[in-house]
Amino acid sequence: MQENTRVGKVSHLLEKLSESATLAMARMGRELAAEGKPVVNLSIGEPDFNTPDFIKEAAIAAIHANVTHYPPVNGFLELRQAISKKFKRDNDLTYSPEQVVVSTGAKQSLANVILALVNPGDEVIMPSPYWVSYAELVKMAGGTVVELHAGIESNFKITAEGLSNAINDKTKLIIYSSPCNPTGSVYSKEELEALSKVILQHEGVYVISDEIYELINFVGKTYSIGACEGMLDRTITVNGVSKAFAMTGWRLGYIGAPIWIAQACNKMQGQITSGANTIAQMAAKAALEADPSVVNEMIAVFKTRRDRVFEGLSKIPGLKINLPEAAFYFYIDVTAFFNTTDGETVVKNSEDMAMYLLRKVYVATVAGDAFGDSNCIRISYATSEENLDQAVSRMAQALSELKPL
């Protein structure tokens, strides 16, 4: 009897996609913790703070006011007006409320834009290291990922010359984050201006600027490439409230974009989720209308943790690290430990290293392969100083046991 190959088969699209590496490591860490293992989870990028009270109060007020009915697909006008003002106040970007689309998290914002713009065969340039979902979303749209590598020696930032060599007639999009996940690097105004001059030489090339870590910045202002001369009509600026306002569970992101792109994203979203959660929208409005200084205390804590982790990691022979300028990550070059063993486990690459640290000393990290750079692992320092001290100590112990093959 002929086997029915149509039974129990997922789509070709799903077969092409990888599981989120950060979520996968977080899951494995939770499984070990459930077994009673003393896991320190440095894999997930989530502030270990609670949402500020004034934001929660705005949400409670919205519930009592019965703001519980279907919203417009692109978000309540009053929230889009607040976002428009925020863009002007903080980023020198002029987006009208009609150019703003509110989504269920910045990840949906990214998906909307990529699916609305990228056709099969289009090339999408991504400076690597990059956030894990960029490449998967491009695959979903049928596009081709073009990685433009920047290593630790350049503080993980590409140059105008490198971009000029990568861009061609097939290029449709450039996607980058500043401040960057996973590296914590920040592009300066001068660096963005140099990149913009290259982009403007190529008709029909657009930029997604992911600025979700905008406020968690230890070196000053975060600049937007959309504010560079000539770039506003070429730029889709993505942001949200998850990181700076400790609102990861509220699931609220947004874009500012040329009107035709905003309309395309509105159409896309209308067939998938419709409008974002109404209560979360009112909470986000309160967050974005507040002075950004309301999160300064949290940012100061992150900076203290960064400095503490940097000091600890700097003492571990073989690790190559830089001092991140923003966000809450270290992207650590571990190539000195490739082709080593502790007598039981062989470490050949960053994925082996991440699994070695998890199983040997119960420290959950993320392998660099998922970020487009197989030389490194990413750790998050969005956890307590006690956890961080334990993690660094355990890492030092585990790495000291690795010897060349």
Image (cartoon, helix red, strand yellow):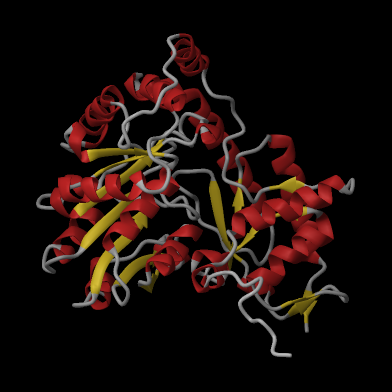
Snapshot quadrant of residue 307: top right
- The image quarter containing residue 388 is top right
Residue 339: percent from left, percent from top: 71, 81
Q: Where residue 85 appears, x then y in whole percent?
A: 22, 27
| Foreground residue among 40 and 391 | 40
Q: Is residue 56 left or right of residue 334?
A: left
Q: Would residue 138 be seen by someone viewing this image from the given angle?
A: yes
Is residue 237 found left or right of 181 in the rendered image?
A: left
The foreground one among 65 and 158 is 65
Q: Is residue 191 left or right of residue 19?
A: left
| Residue that appears at 55% across and 34% down | 249
The image shows residue 268 at horizontal and vertical percentages of 32, 50
Residue 91 drawn above or below residue 180: above
Q: Is residue 365 visible in this depiction of the protein?
A: no
Q: Quadrant of residue 273?
A: top left
Count the marks: how many? 0
Q: Residue furthest front?
A: 1
Instruction: Using residue 276 as the reference point, say whether residue 77 is left or right of it.
Output: left
